Image (cartoon, coloured by chain):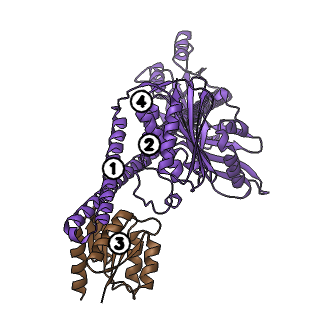
Chain colours: A purple, B brown
Amino acid sequence: MDEKVSVLIVDDNGSTRKSLSLIFRKRGYETETAGTGREAMEKARDRFFNVALLDLKLPDMEGTELLASLKGIYPDMVVIMVTGYASLKTSVRALSRGALAYLIKPLNVDEVLATVKEGVDKQHLTMENRRLYQEAQRELAERKQAEEALRESEASLAEAQRIAHLGNWDWDIVNNTLHWSEENYRIFGLEPQQFGATYEAFMNSVHPDDREFVQKSVNEALYENKPCNIEHRIVLPNGSVCVVHEQAEVTFDERGKPSRMVGTVQDITERKQLWKKMVEYEELDKLKTSLLSTVSHELRTPLAIIKGYSTMLLDYDRRLSPEEKDEHLHSIDKATDRLTDLVDRLLDMSRLDAGLLKLEKVPTSISKMIKDAVVEAKLRAPGHKIVSKIRGKLPEVSIDARRIREVLDNLIDNAVKYSKERSRVVIEAKRVGAELHISVVDRGVGIPAEELERIFDRMYRAEQRLAPKGEGLGLGLGLGLAISKGLVEAHGGRIWMESNDGKGSKCVFTLPL
Amino acid sequence: MTKTVLIIEDEVDVRNFASRVLELEGYRVLQAEDGEEGMRLVGKRRVALVLLDLRLPGCDGWEVLKQLKSDPELSSIPVIVFTASAALPQRERALNMGAADYLVKPLSAARVKETVIHILHRKG
């Protein structure tokens, strides 16, 4: 301790006070004296003394009384009692009240100094211990607070990650250990003990079709310094597929080798689904608009023919030859049929949509139906070679014959429309298990593989360049295949298109027996 | 002098009807079933007026109208748009692009005749 050790000397005898004071000062102590108990208390109230030497007999109070008061204020104060007579009773009382020692007059200077030194050393140790203890306590409290704060911020981070479906990860490339945050596990649907915590274990969760792409992106980040910002699919243990967005950065060692990669992963499955739905709605909206405009166009075209020729026949009656009039009346008749057909198709489509189509099923020979259809199709398309190929004797099937014939005619007309004159159109029928398979095969332009699924959608039509010239755009609403699909499905069958792009197509439908 | 009208229309019956009406009214009529054919004819012959369908295979009526109106030698030929689409914005668009009139099918023989005569007369 740099500060001087202070001693308070309390004695009613002035010369004792003076001589003790002198002795201590000489040895480097700082001293203060008091003649009465009250004076001593006043001085002690102002400041702390390391040591108090108390005479047991004071004019205004007992020394033991003062001892108790001083100890009450300063528990660490070293108090030594001094007295002219020895009394076991008082000395025991003094020691029990916290005095360090009990010295008897005449005082032995060495004994006094030794006792004071012993007391001061002890006091020093006690105070130092307490200080250390308090410091330790404070440090402990601070650490506790810091830990608590860390726990809180970790908890709020985990909470934020959970809400945002955002996890983070840290990959030690040198040791190939991959650390995942809580949310990271949740996104991947794994428990920490289920995860191998390596790059390969992560790759295991990546959708098999996306692995090559993810590997390529990681390689580019590691070796070509490209930013890693990708979307890919993952497969959860329960088999469901999610879409995640990953963003990552690479740390390199002093030799420029990648040592660590850290990143975030966000579950964007919902966002993707929402987006997909939005696009679907937009497409549906476009389809509606386009259906309206097509319907309007398709209805107005035959009306234009009927209105045009009939007004012409009225206005120019006398200037037209009977042959020309006849020709125009035929055109009107054809346009009327076309209009009727359009109205029928529109009604069929809405009945199918509403599930209101009634089927009148009767046992029917499909072989006979195909033969009849071929005979009539040859009349409609005399340029094509239309043939039937029926494998074995087919059983009768319970169907609405008019509706299935409609499907067949539609498929044949389509085959004719998208293939060249003089090419073959083959109608095949065979039994496959508990079903009949009826197919219409052409050697026409075919359908690109990516359009095969859409081909039964309403309003779908092969690209215009594929349509033969002269037929115009007016023929049909693009509802033919959609209606055929609806009719076949209403019978419990299936319909699909097979195609070799550019080498023709094969449309198959089934009917359950 | 007999004036020549070009009809660009892919529906054969509609094309024949309009063409017959105009022939009976004393015009010479050229027929084209698509945009390319129409542009080829208009470049080769002196055409006084074009009757143009909008929905055509390949190069459609809008494209034909744009090409006609952007060619200084052809831009003065009046074009009557003749369509099965009644949508209002299309009408506005066609007139803004320089069409002389916009007719929605179906049309009577009299309406075709009168519109053609009126526009050719206005032009002088």
Give the amino acid at mark 3: Leu
Q: Nearer the viewer, residue A9 or A370?
A: A370
- List x then y, in percent, for residue A362: 42, 24
Spatial CA distance of label 2 from label 4 is: 18 Å
Q: Is residue A360 above or below residue A183?
A: above
Q: State which tag comes first along the sequence, 2 or 4.
A: 4
Q: State which tag comes first along the sequence, 2 or 1.
A: 1
Kindly indicate whether the residue at mark 3 contacts the one at mark 4 (C-beta within 8 angstroms).
no
Closer to the eye: label 4 or 3: 4
- List x then y, in percent, for residue A426: 59, 43
- List x then y, in percent, for residue B14: 33, 65
Q: Residue at x 52, y 17 (%)?
A: A94
Q: In this view, does A70 lie to the left or right of A393?
A: left
Q: Is residue A467 above or below residue A102?
A: below
Q: Is residue A127 above or below residue A500?
A: above
Give the amino acid at mark 1: Asp
Spatial CA distance of label 3 from label 1 is: 26 Å
Closer to the eye: label 4 or 1: 1
Kindly indicate whether the residue at mark 1 contacts the one at mark 4 (C-beta within 8 angstroms).
no
Spatial CA distance of label 2 from label 1 is: 21 Å
Quickly name the residue at label 3. Answer: B52
Closer to the eye: label 2 or 1: 1
Q: Which residue is drawn at 30% across and 52% down?
A: A336
Quarter of the image for residue A319 reads bottom left
Question: Do marks 4 and 1 share a chain?
Answer: yes
Question: What is the number of the mark on residue A351?
Answer: none
Quickly name the residue at label 4. Answer: A400
Res. A162 visible in picture: yes
Spatial CA distance of label 2 from label 3 is: 32 Å
Circle 4 chain = A
Quickly name the residue at label 2. Answer: A482
Quickly name the residue at label 1. Answer: A337
